[in-house]
Amino acid sequence: MNWQAVALLFGGFIVAGLFSWLQHLAYQRTVNRVASEENRSGVVLVTGRGKGKLRGAVVLLVIDRRSRAVTRALAMRGASVFARFREQPELLGPVDGLRERAGSRMAGKAVDDALQRYQRLTAGTAPTLSVP
């Protein structure tokens, strides 16, 4: 292997790392924006992640603890570092049946992960969820 191939391979790793870092920054900005916009009593912001071999999904759910309903939902789905969060109106509504409304398998895994986090956050303060 000559030095040009090594330089090309090294450059590819640098570019991939840069794009991953930029996606992380976009995730961080979105979480902070939603947290500041939804900063009120009685709501919880939880995230969940569903990972597959090629594709994945991340969901952000704002859940009202009193009504046990999702009041805001965003999801990032895809296989590339160019995926961004988008509002998901199909996820709004009662927590019961949320997994079925998720759409894809990876989004369903992400919703399950978010609901488990919600359950841990509200342990002892609200009725527990039955997550399959």
Image (tube, grey):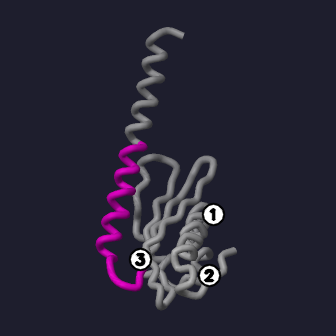
Marker count (numbered): 3
Mark toward the viewer: 3 or 2: 2
What kind of element bears circle 3? Answer: strand
Residue type indicated by callout 1: Arg
- Identify the residue at image location x=35%, y=51%: 25
Residue type indicated by callout 3: Arg
Q: Which residues are magenta?
A: 20-43
- Identify the residue at image location x=59%, y=71%: 116
Of callouts 3 and 2, the N-terminal one: 3
- Residue 120 drawn at (x, y percent): 56, 73
- Identify the residue at image location x=41%, y=49%: 82
Q: Which residue is mark 3?
A: 72
Q: Which residue is mark 2?
A: 129
Q: Which residue is mark 1?
A: 105
- Image quadrant where one finds the N terminus: top right
Real-space Cα separation, disc 1 to disc 2, in angstroms: 20 Å
